[in-house]
Amino acid sequence: MAPQRLQIPPQGIFSKLEKLSTIGATPEGGVRRLALSDEDKLARDQIVSWMLDLNLQVRIDQIGNIFGIRAGMENIAPIMTGSHIDTVINGGNLDGNLGVIAGLEIANALNSASIKTRRPFITGVFTNEEGARFHPDMMGSLVYAGGLKLNEALESRDKKDIALGKELQRIGYDGDLECGAIIPHAFLELHIEQGPILEQENITIGVVENLQGISWTEIEINGQANHAGTTPMNLRKDAGYCAAAVTTFVHNMALEIGNGQVATVGTTELKPAVINVVPGFAKLTVDLRNPDNEHLIKAEKKLDLFLKSLEDTQGVTITTQRLARFNPVIFDTAIVDTIEEKADMMKLPHRKMTSGAGHDAQMMARICPSAMIFIPSVKGVSHNPAEATHPEDIVAGVNLLLQTTLKLLQN
Ligand code: HGY
Ligand code: MN
Ligand code: MN
């Protein structure tokens, strides 16, 4: 069959998505599959079993990344697609899973049509993309791309002080393939947009040409626990007030900077966390992002200055730790053009766009030409059990990935 006529049947996509969504399913209809948890292991086992059913060679690297390899006629640099299957605490069923299943369905379609490709085709499943349990996020692809030393990643610890390396061994995914041993000729990732733009503009495909910079900081505030009733306001060293002040400050700072700046305090912990005790300790995290690195640096500097002012005026001691810092990424224009060309061929409405979220493709872009395809998120919601995408958009995205990949596989 002519490759252009190849179609991926919807039932394979949806049956796999459905099956994965049962692993770590939450009562709210979402998924909780934290990196290297028991649920992550079960989902990994399921993916490996699907890869073996497709006669793919399965390799696992030292940070637990999984690769399903379909041989090409020539033993040359492969085309790789893929994403992640770990989730945030209250995740949805599509974030990451879609990109992995799309790769498997492409391998399936090539097998069913007995299509031999010049280049090998690989579907990758990257470890700890979310960074919800171990920092930083996009860890597996970052190590793969040489941006983080393997040992440093293996030493990363979760809130219970459990080392990532130990968890990899425990779930049996401490592989032997050297990280980065296979350098793709190109990398393509299909992902839900996780934002409102495509739905608002009634467009099926986002052709992602760049991805914003990300800065994660953990802030510890040490003040003095004291009696809520007897301690005059001017004598307090109130870590709880300071944490709230930081949350308000970064929100207003983002509005002031504009230019796409976003700021989030996603976690705040107060101690001793008792109704009638002035908190003596606070720990919070700040997530700053901007497509322009200059603005992102400005935001980081403004936050640092504000923390200093809190120390001076509130008598607290503040320490910070950078958990992640990634510069904005520009994707490969030739692949972007190919995605647009194939979207036109398939008569799919499309537009170029920036990714607000971090993705494994941004790390793979460090070692090979990379780009992404987005499909719309219903009401722009993600990192939430309500995450959803219309089935016809899922089918369109998977088939556009197929057509784009087919062209790259023959190059
Ligand atoms: O943080 C992110 O943008 C991604 O979901 N890990
Ligand atoms: Mn994702
Ligand atoms: Mn995510």
Image (spheres, rainbow, N blue to C red):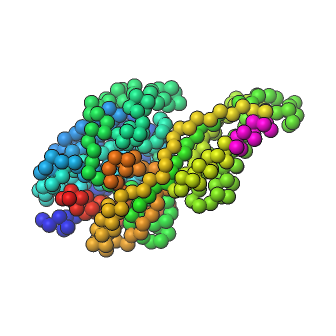
Quadrant of the rendered structure where residue 219 is?
Answer: top right
Q: Residue at x 18, y 59 (%)?
A: 410
Quadrant of the rendered structure where residue 390 is?
Answer: bottom left
- The quadrant of the rendering that contains the N terminus is bottom left
The boundaries of the magenta stretch are: 305-314
Decide: is 69 above or below 332. above
Q: Residue at x 32, y 44 (%)?
A: 125
Q: Confirm whether the magenta stretch covers residue 220.
A: no
Q: Horizontal and vertical percent for residue 130?
A: 45, 43
Decide: is 340 above or below 37. below
- The quadrant of the rendering that contains the C terminus is bottom left
Q: Horizontal and vertical percent for residue 261?
A: 59, 56
Residue 154 in view (yes/no): no
In-front residue for pair 87/244? 244
Q: Residue at x 19, y 41 (%)?
A: 57
Decide: is 392 above or below 366. below
Decide: is 189 above or below 375. above
Quadrant of the rendered structure where residue 334 is?
Answer: bottom left
